[in-house]
Image: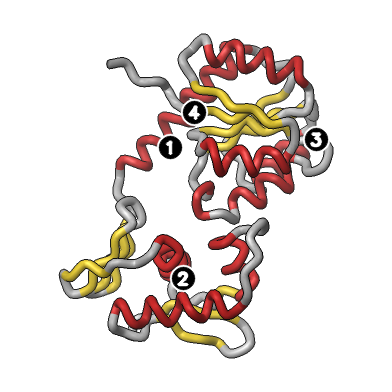
Amino acid sequence: MDTLPGKILIVDDEPDIVEFISYNLKGKGYLISTAKDGVEAIRKARDFRPDLILLDVMMPNKDGIQTIKELRAMPDFEQTAIIFLTALSDERSEIEGLKTGADDYISKPIKPELLATRISAALRRFRKEDEQEQKLVFGDLEINKTKYTVNYQEQEILLAKKEFELLALLASKPGRVFLRNEILQRIWGTDVIVGDRTIDVHIRKIRQKVGIDLITTVKGVGYKFEMP
């Protein structure tokens, strides 16, 4: 059975452009979802789980720069391919887009074959990276970010999804202090209201389940990962 090339979320406030791009990409076998601004884009991304996002820079309500910053702060979209679409053609705009986490940058008017080529290249690059298991290994502790598993002394530790995401985030940069607000935003997002105690509860459960105190509390600031 043939498989589709992937899922693409198109985000642009100009209906004609969205229709034009959608038509061309559907013809190449892509599954398409669309959004008219950054606010809708974030909601659609959570539901649709795209392999790649085409993101316009200049939009009402929430522009592309702010949208990509919020998407990159969410664990689910840290590694999603994102290509900026913009009518701005100056070098400064391109540099700003790439600095905020875009993987590529295409100026309007859109040329269908060029767009398709750049999309294929981005997806090949990301899928090649995905084929390699992402593991964090600290002595007897292994955190597999691809399989969402944790093993300590060859025993698998069962963590809830948010517990795993919290442990993986802290372990991604050992010794670095993650601020409480940063943890809340990156693990729970900006649309979910949770209190500081939520982090404390998850940290306590991780310590209990793993059996070692590998997360240090920095009082009044946040948390950091340190193996004993």
CA separation, marks 3 and 1? 27 Å
Residue drawn at 58 percent across, 11 percent down: 24
Sequence-wise, the earlier of marks 3 and 2 is 3
Q: Are marks 2 and 4 in contact (CB under 8 Å)?
A: no
Q: Which residue is mark 1?
A: 126
Image quarter of residue 59: top right
Q: Are marks 3 and 1 in contact (CB under 8 Å)?
A: no
Left or right: 64, with 119 as reference point: right
* Residue 173 visible in image: no
Q: Position of residue 43 (x, y in %)?
A: 64, 43
User: Circle 4: is it few (<14), some (14-19), or many (20+) Cα within 10 Å?
Assistant: some
Using the image, determine if residue 198 lies above or below residue 26: below
Image quarter of residue 96: top right
Sequence-wise, the earlier of marks 1 and 2 is 1
Q: Are marks 1 and 2 in contact (CB under 8 Å)?
A: no
Question: Tag 1: residue type?
Answer: Phe
Q: Which residue is mark 2?
A: 170
Q: Which residue is mark 4?
A: 7
Nearest to viewer (mark 4 / mark 1): 4
CA separation, marks 1 and 2? 23 Å
Q: Position of residue 213 (x, y in %)?
A: 36, 85
Colouring of the image: secondary structure
Q: Which residue is mark 3?
A: 59
CA separation, marks 3 and 4? 22 Å
Question: Tag 2: residue type?
Answer: Leu
User: Circle 3: is it few (<14), some (14-19), or many (20+) Cα within 10 Å?
Assistant: some
Question: Tag 4: residue type?
Answer: Lys
Residue drawn at 49 percent across, 46 percent down: 79
Say which quadrant the C terminus sits in: bottom left
Sequence-wise, the earlier of marks 4 and 1 is 4
Sequence-wise, the earlier of marks 3 and 4 is 4
CA separation, marks 3 and 2? 34 Å
